[in-house]
Amino acid sequence: MVAFVGAGGKTTAAWRLLRLLVESGERVVFTTTTRIFEPRERGIPLLLSPEPDPAEIERLLARSPALVLAAGRGEEVEVEMDPAHPARSPYAACPTKLVGLAPDVLSALAQRLPGVTWLVEADGAKGRLLKAPAEYEPVVPAGAARVVVVAGLEAIGRPLDERTVHRPEIAARLLGEGRGEAVTEPPTGVGGLPGSCAKPPPQVGVGSQLRQARLDVITPAMVATLLGHQAGGLKGVPPQAQVVVLLTQWGDALAVPAGPGEMQPEARLQPGNSRPEPRTTNHVSHPHAEAIARQLLSGVRIGRVVLANLRAAEPVLKMWEPPPNACAAD
């Protein structure tokens, strides 16, 4: 079971993964614990039940390798309320929201149907690029083996407000100060997660940006902070789950200006610095992605950072993993 949380491309990432898995011959269920627009895709059946029968799921998957599963239909959403949705949606959709299943129901179904891959949208962000979770969010099933934490890099350089961030007041609190006030120390829970054996990053890393950043403009440091915070991107992750951070960009990042307190891309790394090794494709990548990946992988909870253009034919641009000796004794 793979759960998707955060903002900036959860549904698109899950739907693209569904297509890839189906092409490779796997059986896949796309579902939610929150609310999603109802897909209207030919050849992919929809099953609505708050307590689905595993035998019925098996029967439907025998006819089609993919299935959409939800507890029922909820409210209808007028297009005028969200005019950008048709352009963002990875699938043809009805203007109706599907109501999610209880997380324990999904965990039980996954145990009953071990030959099925479960893709669960476990968070809501109202189409924003970044998100800070409320007390009751996200809704990750306890049986999730992997949690993908999503963030949109187009947020960098934009104001920390409700147009870009879902729940910006919570985001500001997690970043350590009120909006518009200087951050003098890196907030706890960033990189130095409990059990981390990695040394703090050098002063040229993302951590030092926090000492200069102002909370009215989103910087790479702030993105890394939110994603790596125990009450942010890591909130609600089951103890046994692997954590992957997915950084999304929606085009070739040819030029992204640095905001207040940010490093220029060419100054991100200095000779001799330990850093995660990227695997690269030929696309133009976001200039701040590597610095964010370095900070996130300086702790032990996040096992991989992926940069992707979810609109590209080959979406994965780079992947970073911790260096092999990240936790080696001195």
Image (tube, rainbow, N blue to C red):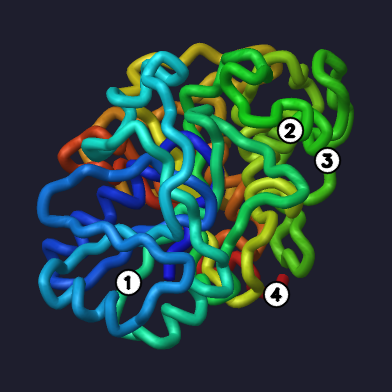
Residue at x 16%, y 63% (from the top left corner):
22
Observer-side mark, 1 or 2, equals 1
| Dot 3: element | loop
Given the image, on which type of amino acid does mark 4 rest?
Ala
Q: Residues within 10 Å of mark 2 (few under 14, many from 20)?
A: many
258 vs 209: above or below:
above
Q: Residues within 10 Å of mark 4 (few under 14, many from 20)?
A: few
Q: Which numbered disc, 2 or 4, marks the residue that appears first in the sequence?
A: 2
Contact (Cβ within 8 Å) of mark 1 with mark 2: no
- The residue indicated by pointer 2 is 171
Residue at x 41%, y 28% (from the top left corner):
286
Residue at x 37%, y 79% (from the top left corner):
53
| Dot 2: element | helix
Q: Which numbered disc, 3 or 2, marks the residue that appears first in the sequence?
A: 2
Residue 289 seen: no
Given the image, on which type of amino acid does mark 2 rest?
Ala
- The residue indicated by pointer 4 is 329
Please tell me the numbered disc located at residue 117.
1
Residue 185 seen: yes
- In which quadrant of the rendered view does residue 170 lie? top right
Please tell me the numbered disc located at residue 187.
3
